[in-house]
Image (tube, grey):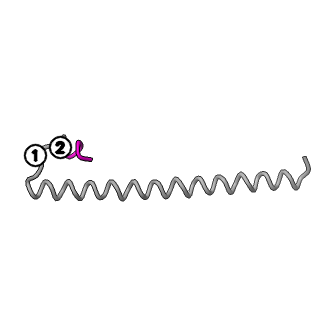
Amino acid sequence: MDAATIKFSSGTRARRENALKSLAASLSLMMDRDVAKKIKKAEEDIKAGKTRSLRDILKDG
């Protein structure tokens, strides 16, 4: 293996790592949005008197 091949391989590895980090960040953001929506819905349900317990909220979530 020559130096150019090693450099290319490490560059490819870095790109893959960056792509995985980006994907993980995107998934985390989507999960945060989903959780925020569930919390907002739970707050609205509590205010409206539609739910009486944490179990109801978790069951719907």
| Residue of label 2 | 56
Report, in whole angstroms, how far the alpha carbon at label 1 lies from the one at label 2. 7 Å
| Residue of label 1 | 52
Is-magenta flag for residue 58? yes
Is-magenta flag for residue 31? no
Residue 36: numbered disc: none
The three-letter code of the residue at mark 1 reads: Arg
Magenta-highlighted stretch: main secondary structure?
helix
Residue 3 or residue 20, whichever sits in front: 20
| Residue drawn at (89%, 53%) of the image | 3
Q: Secondary structure at mark 1?
A: loop
| Residue drawn at (39%, 53%) of the image | 31
| Residue drawn at (56%, 58%) of the image | 22
How crowded pointer 1 is (Cα within 10 Å; few <14, some 14-19, many 20+) is rated as few
Q: Which residues are magenta?
A: 56-61
Give residue 48's position: percent from left, percent from top.
Answer: 9, 58
Residue 24 or residue 59, whichever sits in front: 59
